Image (cartoon, rainbow, N blue to C red):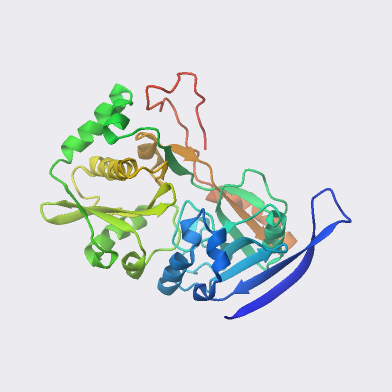
Amino acid sequence: MSLSTEIDERHPASPTSETRKDTTSIVTIDSAKHLPDVWDRLAVHNIYLRKAILQVIESAHHYRQKYHILSNPEPDCIFVTYESPKNTAAEFRDRLCPSHRVIGIPCTVSKCGYQTGEKTREAFWQFVSNMRGLKIVVHSDEKKAQNKFLKIPSLPSFRIEVRWGSFNEYLRCMRSHYRYRLNKALRACRSIKVIPLADSSLFDADLYSLYDQVYRRSRFRREKAKLELFRTLPVETMKFEYRGKAIGFVQTLSNGKELLFFKGGMDYSFESSADLYLMMLLEIIKKGLSKGYKSIDLGQTAGEAKMRVGARPNPLHHYVNHSNRIIHHGMNPFLRFVRPRKIRMVDHRIFKAERENDPVQTV
């Protein structure tokens, strides 16, 4: 196993203490295949941080990933860093962010690339701020602003907390005009076949071209996933076929009691593309309900459509830091150019049980 201890620093036990200090050590590993068993025990709440997933991603997309374990004194924090490819500056645009290091998982959204414990939370942010150059912690659900970091709103993820026993009950609990719109979409798509792929290896170039359509239309995007990734990740794929031609697909992944929407693609030239997209979302929801998941994460983007099927926005943020103080503070005025537009929930009280005075959300 190729392990290298990068630092063995002392960090304050709490912001208010200057005298009591605990020793926090960090180990950095250069390959996912060398990760120890303790890694998966710490990654129990985030499927994208599991060794098996990281190995597949690393094999398809090698961005000089490094895997870090913080201990105090026992292992308590894990995180992944990688170099953002120069041809895709993700949401931050090439003109604003040149080469930079990302704390996250390549080609994934909605989930962050770190897991901290109480003893190592401050040490994690301190270590990242000490890294040289520009660093971006992506898709963090931290509510509290972090010292030394500039906070940028990311696109929210859209989640459904499951409280229905079946898909029919889910539809019955909706207000009539929302239920009517979804039933109308299902009727318009009644000639579309939903075909589960028996194995990820059956994911072909035609399906990949549908993903490419979605990727090209996306305003805020991360690294583009390669065909190899779709064929090797342990995801479940549903293909949508019309008159023998694939016009869409969705991929889902189980994260304990949570169902995750991983990737999707669709043919925008299809005459009822808006109905098709609603059908695709409803198939994910139907699957989550039938298999007893407690929550369904529908991912980022297309928030309006996702809120109309009952999802709520979950705020996410990026945290940006540069080791050069002058550059760091000079970036602040430019960050407004990379902020996504605010998403306002107006009158989207989808379900009958929701009160009229429920607060309107802005993300």
As drawn, the residue found furthest toward the top would be 356
As drawn, the residue found furthest toward the bottom would be 2
Q: Position of residue 62 (x, y in %)?
A: 47, 74
At x 47% / y 51%, what residue is drawn?
Answer: 110
Q: Position of residue 241 (x, y in %)?
A: 17, 52
Q: Is residue 33 visible?
A: yes
Classify residue 215 as left or right of residue 68: left
* Most foreground residue, 260 or 62: 260
Classify residue 22 by image quadrant.
Answer: bottom right
Classify residue 6 by image quadrant.
Answer: bottom right
Classify residue 215 as left or right of residue 67: left
The answer to whether residue 1 is above or below residue 287 is below
As drawn, the residue found furthest toward the left would be 243
Q: Position of residue 195 (x, y in %)?
A: 19, 53
Q: Is residue 96 visible?
A: no
The answer to whether residue 75 is above or below residue 139 is below
* Most foreground residue, 214 or 184: 184
The answer to whether residue 68 is above or below residue 315 is below
Classify residue 344 as left or right of residue 331: left
Q: Position of residue 207 (x, y in %)?
A: 25, 60
Looking at the image, how many numbered discs can be counted on the residues? 0
At x 86% / y 56%, what residue is drawn?
Answer: 20
Q: Quadrant of the N terminus?
A: bottom right
The answer to whether residue 285 is above or below residue 244 is above
At x 79% / y 54%, what residue is drawn?
Answer: 13
Classify residue 293 as left or right of residue 326: left
